[in-house]
Image (cartoon, rainbow, N blue to C red):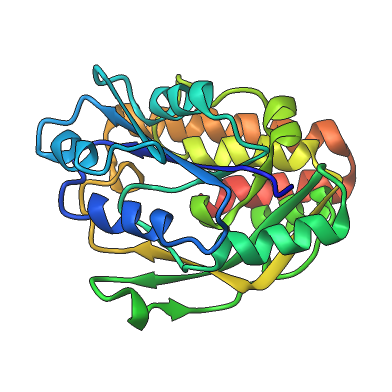
Amino acid sequence: MKELVSILIPCYNAEKWLHEAIESALSQTWKDKEIIVVDDGSTDNSLKIARQYESNLVKVISQENKGAPAARNMALKYARGDYIQWLDADDMLAHDKIEKQMEMAQHIGNQKVLLSCSWGRFFYRYWKANFVPDSLWRDLSPVEWLITSFSKSDWMSNSAWLVSRKLTELAGPWDERLSKNQDGEYFCRVITKSDKVVFVPEAREYVRRSNPKSVSSSLSRRALESLFLSMNLCICHLLSLEDSEGTRKACVEFLQNS
């Protein structure tokens, strides 16, 4: 029996891109899947678009605007999957992304192994995405991954990850105090609970660059306060794994680079 993968899509005012995100989820060659879209109080046609896909396979939930972490926690509340695939409403998955990572997961047989993959940036046409390998495109221990990310300012896209139910439960919910870098803090926490991060190069994910209203681009006071809090939490996560000269050096570089 194949394991169920929950594809969770939080959405806020993404009417221009939501249909492509949902279509990429529906087209996954991994057959055992469910898709949950949580509309976080959108003021555009996002909810209407999501409702058009509602079926036995696609569940749509609407809530008042509470922020992306709350929307993600709501999606997680309803998820039944053995594995969790996060998908931002303006991004897309290659049709075999989940299948490639699940094949690796089943080969490894350890639910505390976290899976990442190749990801590329695009503006309008995903098939023209630019894939640029960096220092995180390889297998790493949790400490190695965080030190490398902190010191080199490299990162992994939200939707590049595939997270087991076990790791999801160990990491706990998304921090609803955060807006900017909420994903950085969450996946930093997931990484600390893992035994290893395994990179699956054949799996691909596409990150859209044409959303000027994304949380990551905000420079409001609230956003910068969130960034500072999330960075402090990330530092604590790394030091909880290893408090050494090497990890402290990486933490200083993390602060300097930001």
Residue that sits furthest to the left in the current view = 44
Residue ID at (74%, 47%): 1
Q: Nearer the viewer, residue 157 or 248?
A: 157
In this rendering, position of residue 20 left or right of residue 168: left
In this rendering, position of residue 195 left or right of residue 66: right
Q: Is residue 152 visible?
A: no
Is 137 placed above or below 2 here?
below
Is 157 placed above or below 122 here?
above
Q: Position of residue 78 (x, y in %)?
A: 49, 23
In this rendering, position of residue 235 left or right of residue 71: right
Q: Quadrant of residue 10?
A: top left
Is 154 placed above or below 48 here?
below
Residue ID at (23%, 71%): 124
Q: How many numbered markers are drawn?
A: 0
Q: Quadrant of residue 58?
A: top left
In this rendering, position of residue 55 left or right of residue 241: left
Q: Nearer the viewer, residue 43 or 236?
A: 43
